[in-house]
Amino acid sequence: MTYSLPTDVPVLDIDPFGEDFQRGPDLFYERLRDAGPVVFLERYRVWAMARFAEVHAALRDHESFSSAAGVGLTNFWKEEPWRPPSLLLEADPPEHTRVRRITTRAMSPRAIEGLRPEFERQAEDLVTTVVARAEFDGVTELAQAYPLRVFPDAVGVGPHGRENLLLYGDMVFNGFGPRNQLFEEAMAPGAPVRDWIAEQCRRASLAPGGLGAGMYAAVDRGEITEDEAGLLVRSLLSAGIDTTVHAIAWTLHMLATQPGQWAALRDDPTLARPAFEETLRYASPVQLFLRATTREVRVADTVIPAGEKVVCFLAAANRDPREYDDPDRFDIRRRTVSHLAFGSGIHACVGAAIARLEAEILLTALARHVRTLELAGPPRPRRNNVLKALARLPLRVRAA
Ligand code: 4MI
Protein backbone atom coordinates (compact mmCIF):
# COMPACT_ATOMS: atom_id res chain seq x y z
CA MET A 1 0.00 0.00 0.00
CA THR A 2 1.30 3.50 -0.73
CA TYR A 3 0.43 6.48 1.40
CA SER A 4 0.64 10.11 0.51
CA LEU A 5 2.21 12.53 2.95
CA PRO A 6 0.48 15.72 3.98
CA THR A 7 1.70 18.82 2.20
CA ASP A 8 2.21 22.28 3.73
CA VAL A 9 3.36 20.81 7.04
CA PRO A 10 6.87 19.79 8.13
CA VAL A 11 7.31 16.02 7.78
CA LEU A 12 9.89 14.67 10.22
CA ASP A 13 11.54 11.26 10.50
CA ILE A 14 11.89 11.53 14.31
CA ASP A 15 10.96 8.37 16.29
CA PRO A 16 9.87 9.40 19.80
CA PHE A 17 9.79 5.72 20.82
CA GLY A 18 13.29 4.94 19.59
CA GLU A 19 16.48 4.48 21.55
CA ASP A 20 18.25 7.68 20.42
CA PHE A 21 15.26 9.80 21.30
CA GLN A 22 14.72 8.20 24.68
CA ARG A 23 18.41 8.47 25.57
CA GLY A 24 18.38 12.24 25.05
CA PRO A 25 15.13 13.81 23.97
CA ASP A 26 16.06 17.48 24.49
CA LEU A 27 17.50 18.20 21.02
CA PHE A 28 14.66 16.30 19.38
CA TYR A 29 12.20 18.43 21.32
CA GLU A 30 13.93 21.57 20.10
CA ARG A 31 13.75 20.32 16.50
CA LEU A 32 10.07 19.47 16.91
CA ARG A 33 9.23 22.86 18.42
CA ASP A 34 11.23 24.80 15.85
CA ALA A 35 9.85 22.88 12.86
CA GLY A 36 6.45 24.52 13.34
CA PRO A 37 3.31 24.64 15.48
CA VAL A 38 2.24 21.27 14.07
CA VAL A 39 4.29 18.61 12.30
CA PHE A 40 3.78 15.15 10.84
CA LEU A 41 5.79 12.15 12.07
CA GLU A 42 6.31 10.02 9.03
CA ARG A 43 7.31 6.83 10.81
CA TYR A 44 4.01 6.40 12.67
CA ARG A 45 1.89 8.56 10.34
CA VAL A 46 0.72 10.75 13.22
CA TRP A 47 0.59 14.49 13.72
CA ALA A 48 2.49 16.15 16.56
CA MET A 49 2.71 19.36 18.54
CA ALA A 50 5.60 20.36 20.80
CA ARG A 51 5.02 24.04 21.50
CA PHE A 52 3.36 25.11 24.75
CA ALA A 53 0.57 27.19 23.17
CA GLU A 54 -0.66 24.47 20.80
CA VAL A 55 -0.31 21.58 23.26
CA HIS A 56 -2.12 23.59 25.93
CA ALA A 57 -4.93 24.54 23.53
CA ALA A 58 -5.37 20.95 22.30
CA LEU A 59 -5.57 19.57 25.85
CA ARG A 60 -8.29 22.09 26.66
CA ASP A 61 -10.26 21.37 23.48
CA HIS A 62 -11.58 17.91 24.28
CA GLU A 63 -14.37 18.27 21.71
CA SER A 64 -11.89 18.43 18.85
CA PHE A 65 -9.19 16.31 20.47
CA SER A 66 -10.71 13.09 21.77
CA SER A 67 -9.23 10.71 24.33
CA ALA A 68 -11.65 7.90 23.47
CA ALA A 69 -9.36 6.48 20.76
CA GLY A 70 -6.73 6.03 23.49
CA VAL A 71 -3.96 8.39 24.55
CA GLY A 72 -1.17 6.14 23.30
CA LEU A 73 -0.20 5.41 19.73
CA THR A 74 -2.82 2.69 19.22
CA ASN A 75 -5.98 4.09 17.64
CA PHE A 76 -8.85 2.27 19.40
CA TRP A 77 -11.17 3.26 16.56
CA LYS A 78 -9.11 1.02 14.25
CA GLU A 79 -7.03 -1.34 16.40
CA GLU A 80 -7.60 -3.51 19.47
CA PRO A 81 -6.28 -2.02 22.75
CA TRP A 82 -4.04 -4.28 24.89
CA ARG A 83 -6.50 -4.05 27.82
CA PRO A 84 -10.10 -2.82 28.21
CA PRO A 85 -9.95 1.00 27.97
CA SER A 86 -9.80 3.13 31.09
CA LEU A 87 -13.14 4.75 31.92
CA LEU A 88 -11.29 7.93 32.86
CA LEU A 89 -8.19 8.35 30.73
CA GLU A 90 -9.49 6.84 27.53
CA ALA A 91 -12.97 8.36 27.48
CA ASP A 92 -14.76 11.58 26.48
CA PRO A 93 -17.76 13.38 27.95
CA PRO A 94 -20.44 12.50 28.84
CA GLU A 95 -19.11 9.06 29.89
CA HIS A 96 -15.92 10.58 31.28
CA THR A 97 -17.74 13.24 33.28
CA ARG A 98 -19.83 10.74 35.25
CA VAL A 99 -16.86 8.71 36.54
CA ARG A 100 -14.46 11.62 36.86
CA ARG A 101 -16.84 13.19 39.39
CA ILE A 102 -16.59 10.08 41.56
CA THR A 103 -12.79 10.01 41.59
CA THR A 104 -12.62 13.76 42.17
CA ARG A 105 -14.90 13.40 45.19
CA ALA A 106 -12.91 10.47 46.62
CA MET A 107 -9.73 12.55 46.29
CA SER A 108 -11.14 15.74 47.79
CA PRO A 109 -8.70 18.14 49.48
CA ARG A 110 -10.02 17.02 52.86
CA ALA A 111 -9.59 13.33 52.10
CA ILE A 112 -6.05 13.95 50.89
CA GLU A 113 -5.07 16.09 53.85
CA GLY A 114 -6.24 13.17 56.00
CA LEU A 115 -3.43 11.09 54.50
CA ARG A 116 -0.76 13.45 55.81
CA PRO A 117 0.00 11.96 59.26
CA GLU A 118 0.61 8.45 57.91
CA PHE A 119 2.55 9.79 54.89
CA GLU A 120 4.76 11.73 57.35
CA ARG A 121 5.39 8.72 59.55
CA GLN A 122 6.47 6.63 56.57
CA ALA A 123 8.71 9.37 55.18
CA GLU A 124 10.39 9.79 58.54
CA ASP A 125 10.98 6.05 58.75
CA LEU A 126 12.39 5.69 55.21
CA VAL A 127 14.56 8.79 55.33
CA THR A 128 16.07 7.81 58.69
CA THR A 129 16.90 4.39 57.24
CA VAL A 130 18.67 5.69 54.11
CA VAL A 131 20.52 8.39 56.03
CA ALA A 132 21.89 5.68 58.35
CA ARG A 133 23.07 3.74 55.29
CA ALA A 134 24.85 6.85 53.89
CA GLU A 135 25.00 5.36 50.35
CA PHE A 136 21.93 3.99 48.67
CA ASP A 137 20.01 3.78 45.41
CA GLY A 138 17.66 6.73 45.19
CA VAL A 139 15.39 4.92 42.74
CA THR A 140 14.68 1.68 44.60
CA GLU A 141 15.22 2.79 48.19
CA LEU A 142 13.39 6.14 48.10
CA ALA A 143 11.60 6.92 44.84
CA GLN A 144 10.04 3.45 44.57
CA ALA A 145 9.93 2.51 48.25
CA TYR A 146 7.95 5.55 49.33
CA PRO A 147 5.06 5.54 46.83
CA LEU A 148 4.91 1.73 47.06
CA ARG A 149 4.30 2.05 50.78
CA VAL A 150 1.98 4.99 51.06
CA PHE A 151 -0.12 4.93 47.89
CA PRO A 152 -1.39 1.32 47.99
CA ASP A 153 -2.08 1.88 51.70
CA ALA A 154 -4.18 4.93 50.78
CA VAL A 155 -6.07 2.92 48.14
CA GLY A 156 -6.59 0.07 50.60
CA VAL A 157 -4.48 -2.60 48.87
CA GLY A 158 -2.98 -5.30 51.09
CA PRO A 159 0.75 -5.53 51.83
CA HIS A 160 1.54 -8.63 49.75
CA GLY A 161 2.58 -8.72 46.10
CA ARG A 162 3.12 -4.99 45.68
CA GLU A 163 6.02 -5.66 43.28
CA ASN A 164 3.24 -6.47 40.80
CA LEU A 165 2.33 -2.78 40.79
CA LEU A 166 5.68 -1.89 39.21
CA LEU A 167 5.39 -4.69 36.66
CA TYR A 168 1.89 -3.51 35.79
CA GLY A 169 3.03 0.11 35.55
CA ASP A 170 5.62 -1.03 33.03
CA MET A 171 2.83 -2.56 30.96
CA VAL A 172 0.62 0.52 31.20
CA PHE A 173 3.25 3.09 30.21
CA ASN A 174 5.11 1.04 27.60
CA GLY A 175 1.67 0.03 26.38
CA PHE A 176 1.06 3.63 25.23
CA GLY A 177 3.81 3.17 22.64
CA PRO A 178 4.08 1.16 19.42
CA ARG A 179 4.51 -2.61 19.56
CA ASN A 180 8.28 -2.28 19.78
CA GLN A 181 10.67 -4.33 21.90
CA LEU A 182 9.92 -2.21 25.00
CA PHE A 183 6.24 -2.94 24.59
CA GLU A 184 6.78 -6.68 24.20
CA GLU A 185 9.22 -6.91 27.12
CA ALA A 186 6.86 -5.01 29.41
CA MET A 187 3.94 -7.28 28.48
CA ALA A 188 5.98 -10.48 28.95
CA PRO A 189 5.07 -11.01 32.66
CA GLY A 190 1.52 -11.31 31.33
CA ALA A 191 -1.50 -12.86 32.98
CA PRO A 192 -0.16 -13.42 36.53
CA VAL A 193 0.44 -9.67 36.91
CA ARG A 194 -2.84 -8.67 35.28
CA ASP A 195 -4.76 -11.23 37.35
CA TRP A 196 -3.16 -9.93 40.55
CA ILE A 197 -4.20 -6.38 39.63
CA ALA A 198 -7.76 -7.53 38.80
CA GLU A 199 -7.93 -9.27 42.18
CA GLN A 200 -6.87 -6.10 44.05
CA CYS A 201 -9.59 -4.14 42.23
CA ARG A 202 -12.39 -6.26 43.71
CA ARG A 203 -14.51 -4.82 46.52
CA ALA A 204 -13.59 -7.65 48.89
CA SER A 205 -9.84 -6.96 48.51
CA LEU A 206 -10.01 -3.29 49.49
CA ALA A 207 -9.64 -2.00 53.04
CA PRO A 208 -12.60 0.03 54.33
CA GLY A 209 -12.12 3.79 54.34
CA GLY A 210 -9.56 3.82 51.52
CA LEU A 211 -9.73 5.42 48.08
CA GLY A 212 -10.61 2.06 46.52
CA ALA A 213 -13.55 1.56 48.88
CA GLY A 214 -14.60 5.09 47.89
CA MET A 215 -15.21 3.83 44.34
CA TYR A 216 -17.47 1.06 45.68
CA ALA A 217 -19.32 3.60 47.86
CA ALA A 218 -20.44 5.14 44.55
CA VAL A 219 -21.86 1.73 43.56
CA ASP A 220 -23.88 1.70 46.78
CA ARG A 221 -25.22 5.18 45.96
CA GLY A 222 -26.35 3.81 42.60
CA GLU A 223 -23.98 5.99 40.58
CA ILE A 224 -21.87 3.32 38.86
CA THR A 225 -21.83 -0.46 38.49
CA GLU A 226 -19.62 -2.87 40.43
CA ASP A 227 -17.55 -3.49 37.26
CA GLU A 228 -17.06 0.23 36.71
CA ALA A 229 -15.83 0.64 40.28
CA GLY A 230 -13.29 -2.11 39.65
CA LEU A 231 -12.03 -0.29 36.55
CA LEU A 232 -11.72 2.97 38.50
CA VAL A 233 -9.59 1.20 41.11
CA ARG A 234 -7.54 -0.12 38.19
CA SER A 235 -7.01 3.51 37.12
CA LEU A 236 -5.69 4.38 40.58
CA LEU A 237 -3.28 1.45 40.48
CA SER A 238 -2.24 2.24 36.88
CA ALA A 239 -1.59 5.93 37.34
CA GLY A 240 -0.58 6.22 40.97
CA ILE A 241 2.83 4.56 41.22
CA ASP A 242 5.27 4.92 38.29
CA THR A 243 4.41 8.55 37.67
CA THR A 244 5.26 9.57 41.24
CA VAL A 245 8.21 7.15 41.39
CA HIS A 246 9.94 8.85 38.46
CA ALA A 247 8.90 12.35 39.44
CA ILE A 248 10.52 11.80 42.84
CA ALA A 249 13.55 10.06 41.31
CA TRP A 250 14.13 13.01 38.96
CA THR A 251 13.72 15.51 41.80
CA LEU A 252 16.45 13.65 43.70
CA HIS A 253 18.56 13.56 40.53
CA MET A 254 18.27 17.30 39.98
CA LEU A 255 19.02 18.13 43.62
CA ALA A 256 21.99 15.75 43.78
CA THR A 257 23.55 17.20 40.63
CA GLN A 258 22.89 20.89 41.39
CA PRO A 259 24.37 21.58 44.83
CA GLY A 260 23.09 25.16 44.95
CA GLN A 261 19.54 23.92 44.44
CA TRP A 262 19.93 21.30 47.17
CA ALA A 263 21.36 23.91 49.54
CA ALA A 264 18.39 26.18 48.86
CA LEU A 265 15.94 23.41 49.74
CA ARG A 266 17.88 22.28 52.80
CA ASP A 267 18.04 25.84 54.14
CA ASP A 268 14.37 26.46 53.39
CA PRO A 269 12.26 23.27 53.42
CA THR A 270 9.21 25.28 52.31
CA LEU A 271 10.83 25.00 48.87
CA ALA A 272 9.88 21.29 48.81
CA ARG A 273 6.74 21.86 46.75
CA PRO A 274 8.32 24.36 44.36
CA ALA A 275 11.27 21.95 43.87
CA PHE A 276 8.88 19.18 42.90
CA GLU A 277 6.93 21.51 40.61
CA GLU A 278 10.08 22.66 38.85
CA THR A 279 11.11 19.03 38.36
CA LEU A 280 7.73 18.28 36.82
CA ARG A 281 8.29 21.11 34.37
CA TYR A 282 11.95 20.32 33.69
CA ALA A 283 11.79 16.51 33.64
CA SER A 284 8.12 15.74 33.04
CA PRO A 285 7.51 12.05 33.92
CA VAL A 286 4.81 11.65 31.26
CA GLN A 287 6.68 12.84 28.19
CA LEU A 288 3.80 12.63 25.75
CA PHE A 289 0.19 11.63 25.31
CA LEU A 290 -1.92 11.54 22.18
CA ARG A 291 -5.37 12.67 21.22
CA ALA A 292 -7.50 11.87 18.15
CA THR A 293 -9.25 14.50 16.06
CA THR A 294 -13.03 14.20 16.03
CA ARG A 295 -13.34 16.52 13.00
CA GLU A 296 -11.14 18.64 10.75
CA VAL A 297 -9.15 20.80 13.15
CA ARG A 298 -7.21 23.90 12.19
CA VAL A 299 -3.95 24.37 14.11
CA ALA A 300 -2.17 27.56 13.07
CA ASP A 301 -2.26 27.33 9.24
CA THR A 302 -2.64 23.56 9.09
CA VAL A 303 -5.85 21.58 8.84
CA ILE A 304 -5.59 18.17 10.49
CA PRO A 305 -8.20 15.80 9.01
CA ALA A 306 -10.76 14.02 11.20
CA GLY A 307 -9.85 10.71 12.85
CA GLU A 308 -6.11 11.40 13.08
CA LYS A 309 -3.88 10.74 16.07
CA VAL A 310 -1.93 13.75 17.37
CA VAL A 311 1.06 13.52 19.71
CA CYS A 312 1.09 16.16 22.43
CA PHE A 313 4.67 16.48 23.64
CA LEU A 314 4.06 17.63 27.22
CA ALA A 315 7.76 17.55 28.08
CA ALA A 316 8.69 19.66 25.04
CA ALA A 317 5.94 22.17 25.79
CA ASN A 318 7.30 22.51 29.33
CA ARG A 319 10.69 23.57 27.91
CA ASP A 320 9.33 25.90 25.26
CA PRO A 321 11.32 29.18 25.22
CA ARG A 322 8.20 30.80 23.75
CA GLU A 323 6.59 30.21 27.17
CA TYR A 324 9.41 30.03 29.71
CA ASP A 325 12.31 32.29 30.35
CA ASP A 326 15.57 30.29 30.04
CA PRO A 327 13.59 27.00 30.02
CA ASP A 328 16.61 24.68 30.33
CA ARG A 329 17.64 26.25 33.62
CA PHE A 330 16.45 24.17 36.60
CA ASP A 331 15.55 26.62 39.33
CA ILE A 332 13.40 25.67 42.30
CA ARG A 333 12.79 29.35 43.03
CA ARG A 334 11.19 29.82 39.64
CA ARG A 335 7.53 30.59 40.19
CA THR A 336 6.13 28.27 37.54
CA VAL A 337 2.55 29.33 37.19
CA SER A 338 1.53 26.54 34.89
CA HIS A 339 3.22 23.53 33.40
CA LEU A 340 1.58 20.73 31.46
CA ALA A 341 3.12 17.77 33.30
CA PHE A 342 -0.27 17.02 34.90
CA GLY A 343 -2.07 17.77 31.64
CA SER A 344 -4.72 20.48 31.40
CA GLY A 345 -8.47 20.64 30.92
CA ILE A 346 -11.00 17.96 31.82
CA HIS A 347 -8.41 15.16 31.94
CA ALA A 348 -5.93 17.02 34.16
CA CYS A 349 -4.42 14.57 36.64
CA VAL A 350 -7.00 13.63 39.25
CA GLY A 351 -4.26 12.47 41.64
CA ALA A 352 -2.05 15.54 41.37
CA ALA A 353 -2.70 16.60 44.96
CA ILE A 354 -1.64 13.17 46.24
CA ALA A 355 1.55 13.25 44.16
CA ARG A 356 2.32 16.72 45.49
CA LEU A 357 1.64 15.63 49.07
CA GLU A 358 3.97 12.62 48.74
CA ALA A 359 6.73 14.73 47.25
CA GLU A 360 6.35 17.57 49.72
CA ILE A 361 6.52 15.24 52.70
CA LEU A 362 9.44 13.16 51.43
CA LEU A 363 11.50 16.19 50.37
CA THR A 364 10.77 18.00 53.63
CA ALA A 365 11.98 14.97 55.60
CA LEU A 366 15.15 14.86 53.48
CA ALA A 367 15.77 18.58 53.95
CA ARG A 368 15.53 18.12 57.71
CA HIS A 369 17.69 15.00 58.01
CA VAL A 370 20.32 15.47 55.32
CA ARG A 371 23.17 18.01 55.14
CA THR A 372 24.86 17.00 51.87
CA LEU A 373 23.32 15.12 48.97
CA GLU A 374 25.45 13.97 46.04
CA LEU A 375 25.80 11.30 43.40
CA ALA A 376 27.74 8.22 44.51
CA GLY A 377 27.99 6.92 40.94
CA PRO A 378 26.52 7.43 37.49
CA PRO A 379 22.71 7.53 37.28
CA ARG A 380 21.28 5.04 34.81
CA PRO A 381 18.22 5.93 32.74
CA ARG A 382 15.49 3.39 32.13
CA ARG A 383 13.90 3.26 28.72
CA ASN A 384 10.14 3.55 28.55
CA ASN A 385 7.78 4.41 25.70
CA VAL A 386 6.29 7.44 27.45
CA LEU A 387 7.89 7.92 30.86
CA LYS A 388 11.10 9.75 31.58
CA ALA A 389 12.44 7.07 33.89
CA LEU A 390 15.53 6.21 35.92
CA ALA A 391 16.81 2.69 36.59
CA ARG A 392 19.44 3.64 39.17
CA LEU A 393 20.42 6.75 41.07
CA PRO A 394 23.39 6.07 43.37
CA LEU A 395 23.28 8.65 46.17
CA ARG A 396 25.51 9.57 49.08
CA VAL A 397 24.21 11.61 51.99
CA ARG A 398 25.65 13.07 55.17
CA ALA A 399 23.30 13.49 58.08
CA ALA A 400 22.31 16.95 59.24
C1 4MI B 1 -1.36 9.98 33.42
S1 4MI B 1 -0.94 8.43 33.76
C2 4MI B 1 -2.40 7.42 33.75
C3 4MI B 1 -3.64 7.95 34.03
C4 4MI B 1 -4.76 7.14 34.05
C5 4MI B 1 -4.62 5.79 33.79
C6 4MI B 1 -3.38 5.26 33.52
C7 4MI B 1 -2.25 6.06 33.51
C8 4MI B 1 -5.83 4.90 33.79
O1 4MI B 1 -5.66 3.69 33.65
O2 4MI B 1 -6.93 5.41 33.95
Image (tube, grey):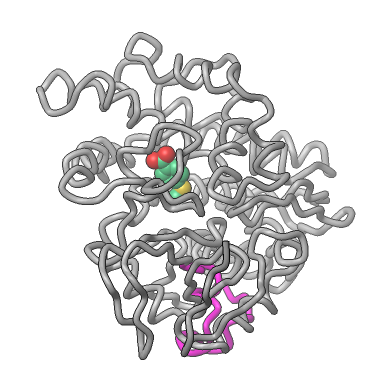
Question: Looking at the image, how many numbered discs can be counted on the residues?
Answer: 0
Q: Give the range drawn in magenta.
A: 312-332
Dividing the picture into quadrants, the one containing residue 227 is top left
Q: Which residue is drawn at 57% across and 61% down?
A: 1
The outermost residue toward the left is: 222
User: Ligand 1 falls in which quarter?
Assistant: top left
The outermost residue toward the top is: 204
Q: Is 333 rendered above or below residue 87? A: below
> Where residue 248 appears, x then y in whole percent?
60, 51
Q: Nearer the viewer, residue 211 or 125?
A: 211
> Where residue 149 appears, x then y in whole percent?
55, 29
Q: Which residue is drawn at 34% across and 72% down?
A: 305
Q: Which of 351 and 228 is in front in this view?
A: 228
Q: Which of 67 and 249 is in front in this view?
A: 67
Task: Report the side of 131 relative to 33 (left or right).
Answer: right
Q: Magenta part mainly helix, strand or loop?
A: loop
Q: Which residue is drawn at 69% across and 64% down?
A: 254
The answer to whether residue 71 is visible is yes
> Where residue 111 appears, x then y in whole percent?
28, 37
Q: Is 94 contained in the magenta span?
A: no
> Where residue 239 appears, x then y in whole percent?
46, 41
Q: Is 124 rendered above or below residue 381? A: above
Q: Is 319 rendered above or below residue 66? A: below
The answer to whether residue 356 is visible is no
Task: Report the side of 189 relative to 311 (left or right).
Answer: right
